[in-house]
Amino acid sequence: MERLVIRGGVPLKGRIHVSGAKNAVLKLMCASLLSHEPCCIRNVPRIKDVATMCDVLRSLGARVDWRGSSLWIEVPDKLDYTAPHELIKSMRASIQVMGPLLVRLGKVRVSLPGGCAIGDRPIDMHLRGLRALGARVWEDQGYIYAQGERLRGAEIHLDYPSVGATENLMMAAALAKGKTTIQNAAMEPEIIESQEFLNKMGARIRGAGTNKIEIEGVEELGGADYQVIPDRVEAGSYMLAAAMTGGDLTIEGAVADHLGAVIHKLLEAGVELECLDRETIRVRGTGLIRPFHLRTRPYPGFPTDLQPQFVALATIARGISIITEEIYNNRLKHVAELRRMGADIVVEGQTAIIRGVGRLSGAVVSVPDLRAGAALVLAGLAADGETVVEDVGHIDRGYEGIEGKLAAVGAQIRREGIEERAC
Ligand code: EPZ
């Protein structure tokens, strides 16, 4: 188990480079299962979730090799139809192999993903969509089975714009017979990445980025060579690092088009922003953070993956902020840890009411989940004294080299290994 030791109060200054988007890369890796030719995905972050997905693909029989910051994926004709239970349990995104395996092999078995640290995360919309495409889907002893020799296109209406369900069904429909329409589709930038990658493989998909996606099934898909967009959640996290330390950071890979709601909220909070070009934003903290209200929403609404980090920002605002988590039913675990640092936060249901304090104080805090971990690092950077952020493995799931990137712009931060206590 490793930890980060941070001495806060240092205004961060300089340039930070944002890595490739975790929540796009993981899906493109799954989409490569549809191809009979090699695929190359570029700008891939070296993070734990990507390593887990490499293991999932290898466990199915695919060959996955790193070449610098690219992944080279070759999928044999003989693929296994089931991914190991322990891998699916460790990362929910693994269920994105269902669509590709079902449509390529005619069957798939995955273990039912449990809830995770941020709440119940059922996959009913994924399964209803696969049934609409003609698959037989059933559950047995904690596993989900789906079978269907030749999926056929269908009109699918999602009850909620689920990112994962949209992507899983796009991949299944790409090789189904006939036309599929997904209504009330998710509109995240990562959905557009899936469409562009699949179309490079020979798929015929249009409408990604809108709430209606149309897929004309084709007979087979080839390889693709694709450069992934920067990670908008990582970008937003580092924009907050400038705001919370009163620093001046230029974030390379902050795509303004992907960060509309975040930019709007930062301006409302009094942070100075300057878009230097399409993918670079300069952020200056003024020392005064105005309180704000926000509620998380599907894209283009405010992203839930930056909610914990904005709670951290609100802890040092000049007034009372109100933040409501609308996507997940248990994504406020960072509040208890922030309170240990002197934050004044009251939680009512899924709403955090945050009364800003002048300064946070360093403390030993424990990371409950990936984005809460980022929030605690940000709080440590802004706090007086030393903060020890334990269980850093959660953060390493989604942030490539976080301490190196922050130290390069002046943060006093180091990683320490902790010998596992002999039990
Ligand atoms: C993706 O998760 C992201 N993960 C999440 O990022 C992100 O928070 C989420 O989209 C929303 O933007 C990846 O892309 C790997 P959903 P996903 O399906 O696809 C409910 C991070 O920190 N739901 O849009 O699982 C679900 O329980 C992670 O990088 C159903 O009820 O999100 C949740 O409450 C965390 N039934 C809501 O919808 C379903 O069949 C949003 O889920 C599917 C989802």
Image (cartoon, rainbow, N blue to C red):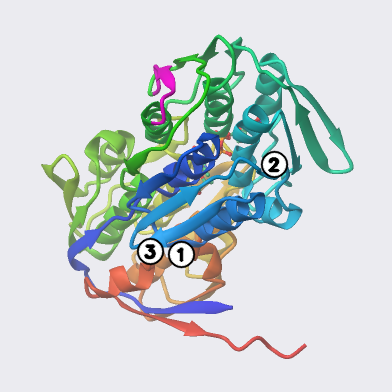
Disc 1 marks a residue whose amino acid type is Leu
What residue is rendered at 30% in x and 57% in y? 238
Of badges 2 and 1, nearer the viewer stands 2
Q: Which residue is mark 2?
A: 120
202 in relation to 215, above or below: below
Task: Please state the horizontal and vertical placement of residue 91, each as a whole percent of the image.
Answer: 62, 52
Disc 3 marks a residue whose amino acid type is Leu
Task: Please state the horizontal and vertical placement of residue 18, each as a whole percent of the image.
Answer: 29, 55
What residue is rendered at 73% in x and 44% in y? 82
- Kindly indicate whether the residue at mark 3 contacts the one at mark 1 (C-beta within 8 angstroms): yes
Residue in front for this viewpoint, 43 or 267: 43
Of the two numbered discs 2 and 1 on the same chain, state the one appearing first in sequence. Answer: 2
Q: Which residue is mark 3?
A: 378
24 in relation to 170, above or below: below
What residue is rendered at 69% in x and 41% in y? 120
226 in relation to 316, above or below: above
Gap in angstroms between the C-alphas marked 1 and 3: 5 Å
Q: Which residue is mark 1?
A: 376
Does residue 324 appear in the picture of this structure? no
How many labels sit on residues? 3
* Structural crowding at the residue carrying mark 2, measured as other residues with C-alpha within 10 Å and reported as few (<14), some (14–19) or many (≥20): few
Magenta part of the chain: 201-208
Residue 194 on the magenta span:
no
Residue in front for this viewpoint, 83 or 391: 83
Decide if residue 246 is on the left or right side of residue 374.
Answer: left
- Name the outermost residue toward the front: 77
Mark 2 CB within 8 Å of ligand 1:
yes
Decide if residue 263 is on the left or right side of residue 6.
Answer: left
Of badges 2 and 3, nearer the viewer stands 2
